[in-house]
Amino acid sequence: MAESQKMYDVVFLGHYTKDTIVSAAGTRVVDGGACNYGANVAARMGLRVAVVTRLAEEDFHVVEALQQLGVDVFARATPHSTCLRLEYPTSNVDERVIYVTSTAGPFTPAEVESLQARAFVIGASMRGEVGLDVIEELGRKDALLAADVQSFIRVNSNGVLVPEPWPEKHQVMAHLDVLKTDAVEAELLTGETDIKVAAQMIADLGPQEVVITHRNGVLVYADGQFHEAGFFPAQLVGRSGRGDTCIASYVSKRLSASPAEAIIWAAAVTSLKMEAEGPFRREIGEVEDLIRRKYS
């Protein structure tokens, strides 16, 4: 399905999602999906980027927008895109209910087997999109393998996304180099409310690096060390896609920098992304300026 000769820096695997966002500010439809959020960051960083995704033909404007950024998109047309409705009932942006109205179906190992990259980032909306067969295919490659835990613990239960126990946790974690979670998911995985303790427990399951986002910023545990960086958005408008943007910018920077540098980069990119809905669309110079002002 994909050309095998080309070597990418980062390949993002996951569904495009058509997100209906409902909050005190009103109701609007936003083009989402971890692969979309991630590729927008990595492409603007000047990396060689590919996306493997599934979506309905009516939403292929998203494919074209990524291609205009220089991203190679391997898209499978499906009867329906994955459509989500994200409702924020209070002013706390971490309180939300996510409804599933349709899905684009599971990926197959054939969709990734011929791709070569320095890093693969798995960002699924829910369990069932990326199965263990696909993880094992990616695990055979000589590449950094990163995943967002929501890809596995969020389950479509009668049209609502809910966290459930993860039976394949140990098999999947054994293949991962980087696992991204948020503070709530970290507690679900480990039973531990202290994110530093939770990060160490997750690392014991296999991933060398654990990235945990929370309301105020991001923590990484790597090589037995903790590094932290805060979020500094001038205004909080685009909560949806926070974690997707954070892990994408972390892995993209990690290809050329230490965990300590990569986490600051990720926090700065994510801060700017949260100032607007939809993917990161800022100039890289603005990230560097924010780092000089807030993180140095």
Image (cartoon, helix red, strand yellow):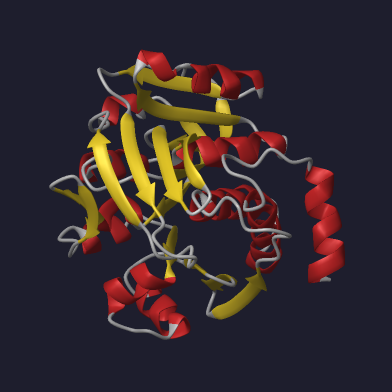
Q: Position of residue 128 (x, y in %)?
A: 21, 42
Query: What count of labels does the image hold?
Result: 0
- In which quadrant of the rendered view does residue 109 lie? top left
Q: Could you say where residue 14 lies in the image, as x and y percent from the top left?
A: 38, 37
Classify 13 as above or below 223: above
Which quadrant would the C terminus be assigned to in this image? Answer: bottom right
* Above or below, 202 relative to 153: below
Q: What percent of the width, then of the height, locates residue 284?
A: 78, 44
Q: Is residue 66 left or right of residue 1?
A: right
Vertical arrangement, residue 26 with respect to residue 232, above or below? above
> Which quadrant is home to the N terminus?
top left
Q: Nearer the viewer, residue 99 or 184?
A: 99
Depth check: give the residue in front, 276 or 291: 276
Residue at image point 36% right, 29% down: 112
Q: Residue at x 59, y 72 (%)?
A: 216
- Residue 285 placed where, x, y %? 84, 46
Quarter location, residue 100: top left
Query: Which residue is drawn at the image coordinates 86% and 55% (left, top)?
Result: 289
Any part of residue 136 in sight? no
Identity of the residue drawn at 40% across and 39% down: 20
In front of the other: 209 or 212: 212
Query: Relative to residue 1, is residue 121 drawn left or right?
Result: right
Q: Quadrant of residue 268?
A: bottom right
* Visible residue check, residue 278: yes
Above or below: residue 264 compared with residue 248: below
